[in-house]
Amino acid sequence: MSDWIEVAKMEELPRLSARVVQFDTVKIAVFRTSQDAVLAVKDRCPHRGGPLSQGIVHGNLVTCPMHNWRIDLATGEAVQPDQGCVRTYETKVEDGRVYLRLSSAAANANSCVEHA
Amino acid sequence: MQKMKLVMVGNGMAGMRTIEELLKIAPGLYDITVFGAELHPNYNRILLSPVLAGEQTVQDIVLNSMDWYAENGIHLHLGKKIDKIDRKNRVVEAEDGSRAEYDRLLLATGSNPFMLPVPGADLPGVISFRDIADVEAMISASAQYKHAVVIGGGLLGLEAANGLKQRGMEVSVVHIAPWLMERQLDEPAARLLQKSLEDKGLKFLLQKQTAELVRGESGRVCAVNFKDGESIPADLVVMAVGIRPNTELAESAGIHCHRGIVVNDTMQTFDPRVYAVGECVNHRGVAYGLVAPLFEQAKVAANHLAEYGISRYQGSVTSTKLKVTGIDLFSAGDFTGDEGTESLVFSDPGSGDYKKVVIKDNKLVGACLYGDTINGAWYFDLLREGTDISQFRKTILFGQHHLGDSGHGPADHVAALPDTAEICGCNGVCKGDIVKAIVDKKLFTLDDVRAHTKASSSCGSCTGLVEALLAHTVGDYSVAPSKKPLCKCTEHSHDEVIAAIKDKGLKSMRAVFDFLEWKTPDGCASCRPALNYYLLARWPGEYQDDKHSRFINERAHGNIQKDGSFSVVPRMWGGLTNPKELRAIADVAEKYRVPEVKVTGGQRIDLFGVKKEDLPLMWKDLSAAGFVSGHAYGKALRTVKTCVGSQWCRFGTQDSTGLGVKLEQLTWGSWMPHKYKLAVSGCPRNCAEATIKDFGVVCVDSGYELHVGGNGGIKVRVTDLLCKVETEEQVMEYCGAFAQLYREEAHYLERTAPWVERVGLNYIKQRILEDEKGRVELNERFKHGQRFAQIDPWKERAEGVDATEFQTIRISA
């Protein structure tokens, strides 16, 4: 099976919002920015595990709804002075369809080492 | 393309703050070169006093390390004094011949200490108190010599004298005026100050004029002679009689100077390529010597250097604190007063407390505090904002916590708290953590402290304490800018944004961003919800609510819980329910396996632990049973709490339950700046606790008392009595009008309690009571808005609106 899996159509993912993709037991938040970039990270804030998919999206950032940490969706890094990172996933958009690169073999798109 | 070249002359606090602000908003715009005459990187000049007193070291007060300059690609030239500007060829030249070309030049040459023109002023052992070299000279003199004389009994002179005394010298302070710090203190306060300094061992010679500094056998100064013929021994003389803007360089280049380098409101000099900030500047005839105004100037200069061109410096009101350990004084504004003013004075010489506030036309125009200065920041706010103080004139001297300050007051004496005292209860941050972060990370602003420690970043009730800690730890940094921007995406305040939306007819978020020149493409999690609310409140029926600018609770119409589940609270009108409703709730709770059911404080039932995906299904069932959303999750009308009233209660005077239901039917669904609660009590026993609600009704035999601005949350605030009315219809009208006034004028996330305190009860009375036509119109606008707001969001979503918001996409490997 190919690593790339279609998860939604672009129109099902409005600008400045997110959808939750549950891949087996892992929840992944897929965001669409105002500039139509599609970015995906694990749906778990590095701070206390808040659901990032529920946050407000601005620029390439999402603000976690729990304690207002800001996460850069492109790199997975928390915005300074907060420190932490979340795993990112590769995405692509073709013919108005959103794909995620999902397989247990797919390496971390960034080098974030998750803490429990 | 080649970068523009920015050269800065003067490596001090105002200049470097400008560079920092510039790097923040327009990194990479310039190739930056900095010339500093001293050999040190930028340090905190304000903290020279603690260094002299041995409480801190030079290393402690460095603000930008050498590494910092390197990391930011700044060419730093230390120990090089620029002595020539060639404006025609746009080149500056240092004494050693090194040169730098510029496209923009920033002058931040600071000030020079003023040396009295008396014979002997140039002798060895006569110094000023201005830079690290002076401090080092004083420290080394204190190790060898005994007698120090400080000329000048102002802020700087006293700090120098205190430091030298701490270093073991015999110190006399010579002052020409009849009392110390006459520009900051009135006589009684100055006497208290003098006494506590005398208790520390300082000597004072007041109303003395220096005639001559006498040369000793060694060639070093040995005595000070006065005009009245007296003489005292002196091995070290520190001149601290004032500062003069350092305009030598600017003048030599033909840039217009007059008691400082003259700048306009954009900090531009008469040469449009040349900007100036700091103590060297004369802005609207004033040269500032305190750090807060200089930082405001820095921000403006940076904005223009970044070619944003949208900010103006309009002058500052300043306040003073003395950094001598164990002595607290505060002064601001016109603390002397004249025929047109009144003074309120509290004096307790025994305990060393003195407070004076000067009032003109019901506004504070000056304050002078000695001893207990905890309320200085509050007085300063009242002064700058021109708040009408007539409501609390009688207690103003006793401070803000005397008022019931709804979470905004600097509470207790933070200085006296132990390091382990918890300051921020939400994030568990102790005093020691905050002080350490302020010192280690060199934090200056509330925002910095919030970002680094999380203190006061949640509910905000400890903001006053954190500000007080900041003030106490770093000196006069406590002064907030006179205008607080809505968030970091804009320079504009809440009031300016509200006014622009109304006056310029801005009807979309994009229009607001464009017209007010937002700095970020889509705002942030702070401003977007605020703007969405302002637009919705101003243009009901026209503005399309933007759910992506709402916090998750309002987007999903439930309260998000720590595990990501939601809670569901159906509306129970006036707290009334019946077996059928209860049965429906019980059924829903079982069907969706709700793990916990709880009765809320607002007289309704909360179902906890509901999965987001289940929300629309659950709402469908609740909707079928006749329930609508309780808006328990929103900045909106929450509940109307009632007691049983005249129908059952033997004390009840009116039908409080029935009235509560009517009020809830009137107000449900309305979005507010913050959560908004009502209550109706059937008699003055007030079982519905109406006097801690945003709008409370207390029924009496002859009618209805209307109370406003109460709060039972973070900081309990009892309501103010607005008025008494006779009929239920009047209650409804006043209720609508008050809610609308709050909706139109309060800042987003400002509860009614701080709002009422900010604008004053008199203002509310004027708008609701005196202006009858205005009240009717407010109520009409409220009812108009309700036509679009009273649509049950649960029913809509149960019928399929926003379906994707609640659906998870499932994929298996």
Image (cartoon, coloured by chain):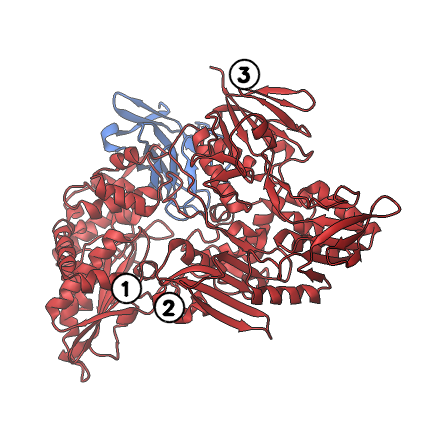
Chain colours: A blue, B red
Which mark is drawn over residue B89?
3
Judging from the image, mark 1 belongs to the subunit labelled B
Q: Position of residue A52 (x, y in %)?
A: 37, 41
Q: Position of residue B535 (x, y in %)?
A: 23, 44
Question: Image height check: is B29 above or below B312?
Answer: above
Of B573 and B61, nearer the camera is B61
Mark 2 surroundings within 10 Å by alpha-carbon count, few (fewer than 14), some (14 through 19), many (20 or more) = some
Between marks 1 and 2, how big is the CA–CA gap?
12 Å
Residue A76 appears in view:
no
Q: Residue at x 72, y 62 (%)?
A: B203
Q: Which residue is mark 2?
A: B392
Query: Is A6 on the left or on the right of B74, as rendered?
Result: left
Judging from the image, mark 2 belongs to the subunit labelled B
Between marks 2 and 3, how big is the CA–CA gap?
61 Å
Q: Which residue is mark 1?
A: B762
Judging from the image, mark 3 belongs to the subunit labelled B
- Type of residue at label 2? Phe
Mark 3 surroundings within 10 Å by alpha-carbon count, few (fewer than 14), some (14 through 19), many (20 or more) = few
Dot 2 or dot 3, earlier in sequence: 3
Q: Secondary structure at mark 3?
A: loop
Question: Image height check: is B384 above or below A64?
Answer: below
Q: Position of residue B594 (x, y in %)?
A: 28, 57
